[in-house]
Image: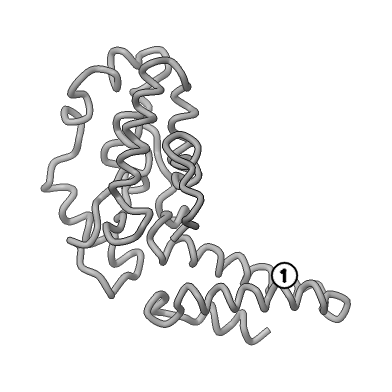
Amino acid sequence: MGIALNVMNCSAPYNIFTRKSLHSMSSRLQWFLKNQINHVDHIMLNQATFATSFIFLALNSWAGTLPNHALTSGVADPHVTQSNLYQTVCVRGYSSHVRPPESYTEPLKYRLIALYGDKGHRVSDYELDHLIEISTGGSPADPANLWLQPRWTHWNARKKDELEFRLHQLLCHGDISLEQAQQAQSQNWIESYRKYVHPDPTQDND
């Protein structure tokens, strides 16, 4: 399974593998599993499956539209609960009151860009985003709730801001629960945008 080893030995992901080439490799792996499964032993099958999963993860994280959930899983603030929404996130100005200072967030941006392995863009090309927004009970300062979201893609920081605003409205109007608002962001915010803001059928997760 040379292809699995070649993928895993990559040290500079996105400047070597384009989205097109990653999709091509993923398709070839899927064809191999479908047509050659009778000739592959159990260990080789596990390798192929793992490599396909790795490419899927790469397509979501290296492109920048969705975070790598191994690095940014989304963390809720334990101080915000369903029973105290109108004393916390639904109070005007709550987010700015608990937002971490620049002395914390600025160094974190550089650590995150190194952690994600992006050598092709500047920190200013991104917005430091709370995967679960503070206004819907996301942790203000936990690094596992913070990621660098690109400004240049179709699914950019502005679109996620639209989703966050809409979810906050629905939450504070009692139309969705705190858990629903948080899962809408932590699981796949693009699909949630299509559900809660606009279907946007002309664009994939690019």
Residue that badge 1 annotates: 46
Above or below, comparing residue 139 to residue 152 in the picture: above
User: Farthest right residue?
Assistant: 38
Viewer-proximal residue, 169 or 48?
169
Residue 77 % position (x, y): 35, 30
Total numbered circles: 1
Residue 138 % position (x, y): 35, 34
| Label 1 crowd bin: few (<14), some (14–19), many (20+), radius 10 Å | few
Residue beneath the point at 28% across and 13% down: 87
Left or right of 40: which side holds 19? left
> Which quadrant of the rendered structure holds the C terminus?
bottom left
Residue beneath the point at 40% across and 23% down: 170
Left or right of 103: which side holds 121? right
Residue beneath the point at 60% across and 65% down: 53
User: Farthest front residue?
Assistant: 202
Left or right of 67: which side holds 130? left
Residue beneath the point at 53% across and 75% down: 22
Left or right of 93: which side holds 1? right
Question: Tag 1's secondary structure?
Answer: helix
The amino acid type of the residue labelled 1 equals: Asn
Above or below, comparing residue 201 to residue 81 in the picture: below
Viewer-proximal residue, 199 or 135?
199
Q: Quadrant of residue 61?
A: bottom left
> Which quadrant of the rendered structure holds the N terminus?
bottom right
Residue 46 % position (x, y): 72, 70
Residue 151 % position (x, y): 27, 57
Above or below, comparing residue 162 to residue 169 in the picture: below
Q: Quadrant of residue 66?
A: bottom left
